[in-house]
Amino acid sequence: MAGPVFDPYAVLQVLPTAEQEVVHGAFRALALKYHPDRDPSRRAADKMGDLNRAYALLRDETARAAHDRNRRAMIAGISVAATARASSAPPAKTADGSVLAFGRYTGWSLPDLARQDPDYLRWLSRHSSGIRYRTEIYGILRTMGVSAA
């Protein structure tokens, strides 16, 4: 069983929408409080290690953006592996069927998408962007023995 997920925003006690200046200020204030020169306890040393780790992640804009994408994906219930897989190119030879011209599966045919990510196909059948494909999606899901609901 995995341990708790490290949340740098909780460690620094800031909102995920906080600006860089706020993140920097929170780090400085908490670092002053838990610095080993001020508090020699083991708890303070552990807290300072977490603060350094959180600040190292959030001060770099590229690392912060990647963390935020992964965080949003986890909140939405999408695994990071599925997100990475979804951003891959469509299969070289696509199956017969409508081809998506939008979203993360641009260029994928609906049958190929059904094999790759049936959950996304079910979501698309309920979303307004999938209205024009709904009948075809229902047929594909029915042949797979999956309900659109």
Image (spheres, rainbow, N blue to C red):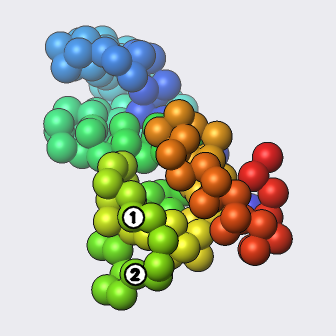
x then y, percent, for residue 85: 42, 69
Near-viewer residue (48 or 56): 56
User: Disc 2 marks which amino acid?
Assistant: Thr
Gap in Å between the C-alphas at discs 1 and 2?
Answer: 9 Å
Determine contact: label 1, label 2, CB under 8 Å. Answer: yes
Left or right position of 113 against 85: right
User: Disc 1 marks which amino acid?
Assistant: Val
Left or right position of 143 against 26: right
x then y, percent, for residue 115: 58, 76
- Does the image show residue 61? yes
Near-viewer residue (80 or 6): 80
Which residue is rendered at x = 60% and y = 60% of the image?
A: 136
Question: Element at badge 1?
Answer: loop
Which residue is rendered at x = 44% and y = 64% of the image?
A: 98
| For marks 1 and 2 on the same chain, the one whose residue lies earlier in the sequence | 2
Up the image or down, 31 lies above or below 71; here it is above
> What mark, if any, has residue 99 been given in the picture?
1
Q: Residues within 10 Å of mark 1 (few under 14, many from 20)?
A: some
Which residue is rendered at x = 79% and y = 46% of the image?
A: 149
Which residue was labeled with disc 2? 94
Near-viewer residue (82 or 95): 95
Q: Residues within 10 Å of mark 2 (few under 14, many from 20)?
A: some
Up the image or down, 7 lies above or below 105; here it is above
